[in-house]
Image (tube, helix red, strand yellow):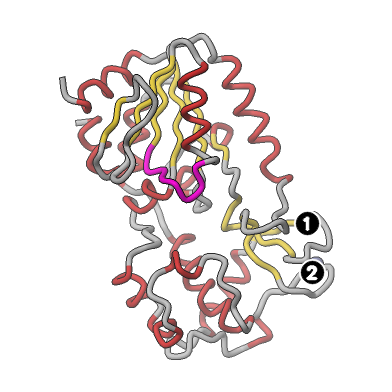
């Protein structure tokens, strides 16, 4: 039996499915933070600053708000405009009518966009659609999409600067710099994710003794504490849980893991095929 056949059998026999998704899943859906070719095409103005891919700019201390938002507004618009993609649709059809819960380190809302139940999604690392104060002066978060739409027509593709500074977003409370509501430092405002965290914990305790398929996809070692280690903990602590780990680079896992060393889109099309 191939690992794909084993994985298919585990999923089909499961009472419930826990999905743990990392950057590799969104990369398979066209959001690859390491893709240098897409970067050069989307952000030509960033090349003069010796930036070569989006991953490099995560946590980058932009010297100027006009450059920061000239880059971010284009990057965010790409994520906001994304629609349904094959790899997520394959995952949805693989789950079928089974009970499931998703935990993802991705902040792109691709699970939401692809029709997964919003009450069954936990995004502990935040959400690109929300903005927050970087100080932060309070615990307020708000929809950042209108700001991005306002800045976008003013991005100079040669310099990557927002030319109309009056469109740069500032904190509505203190007037200070803002950022997406994502876990990038100790300024991260966490309360919007508290209800999701409670929901997944309740779901896990309800499913503790059921036949559980844990399908982990594209989670590497950048933030292993978010997806990989919790998935391993569930697999070893729940008596009837099986971990299926899909990873191009690091498919190995604890004893009993079904390791699939393929990209997410190949794996999912094979699993539903
Ligand atoms: Zn503020």
Residue 150, image quadrant: bottom right
Q: Residue at x 53, y 86 (%)?
A: 161
| Disc 1 CB within 8 Å of nearest ligand 1 atom | yes
Q: Are marks 2 and 1 in contact (CB under 8 Å)?
A: yes
Instruction: Verify whether residue 222 appears in magenta.
Output: yes
Q: CA distance from mark 2 to mark 1?
A: 9 Å
Q: Which mark is residue 172?
A: 2
The span shown in magenta is 217-224
Q: Report the residue at 40% width, 61% height from top.
A: 33
The residue at 54%/32% (across/down) is 120
- Residue that protrudes farthest toward the left in the picture: 1
Question: Is the N terminus in the top left, top right, bottom left or bottom right quadrant?
Answer: top left
Q: Which mark is residue 211?
A: none
Mark 2 / mark 1, whichever is N-terminal: 1
The number of numbered badges drawn on the structure is 2
Residue 219 sits inside the magenta stretch: yes
- Classify the position of ligand 1 by quadrant: top left, top right, bottom left or bottom right: bottom right
What residue is disc 1 on?
140
Instruction: Look at the numbered disc 1 and give the secondary structure of its residue.
Output: loop
Note whether 264 is above or below 15 in the view shown.
Answer: below
């Amino acid at each position: 039996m191939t690992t794909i056949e084993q994985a298919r059998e585990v999923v089909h026999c499961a009472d419930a499915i826990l999905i743990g998704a990392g950057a590799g899943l969104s990369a398979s859906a066209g959001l690859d933070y390491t893709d240098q070719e897409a970067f050069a095409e989307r952000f030509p103005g960033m090349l003069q600053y010796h930036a070569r891919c989006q991953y490099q700019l995560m946590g980058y201390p932009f010297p100027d708000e006009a450059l920061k938002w000239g880059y971010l507004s284009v990057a965010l618009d790409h994520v906001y405009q994304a629609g349904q993609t094959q790899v997520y649709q394959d995952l949805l059809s693989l789950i079928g009518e089974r009970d499931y819960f998703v935990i993802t380190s991705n902040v792109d809302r691709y699970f939401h966009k692809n029709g997964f139940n919003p009450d069954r999604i936990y995004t502990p690392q935040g959400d690109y659609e929300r903005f927050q104060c970087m100080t932060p002066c309070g615990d307020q978060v708000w929809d950042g999409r209108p700001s991005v739409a306002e800045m976008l027509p003013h991005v100079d593709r040669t310099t990557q600067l927002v030319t109309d500074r009056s469109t740069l977003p500032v904190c509505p409370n203190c007037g200070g710099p803002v950022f997406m509501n994502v876990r990038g430092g100790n300024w991260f405002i966490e309360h919007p994710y508290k209800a999701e965290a409670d929901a997944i914990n309740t779901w896990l305790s309800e499913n503790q003794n059921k036949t559980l398929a844990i399908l982990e996809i594209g989670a590497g070692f950048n933030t292993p504490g978010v997806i990989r280690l919790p998935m391993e903990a569930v697999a070893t602590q729940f008596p009837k849980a099986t971990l299926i780990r899909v990873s191009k680079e690091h498919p190995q896992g604890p004893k009993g893991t079904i390791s699939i060393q393929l990209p997410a889109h190949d794996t999912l099309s094979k699993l539903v095929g």
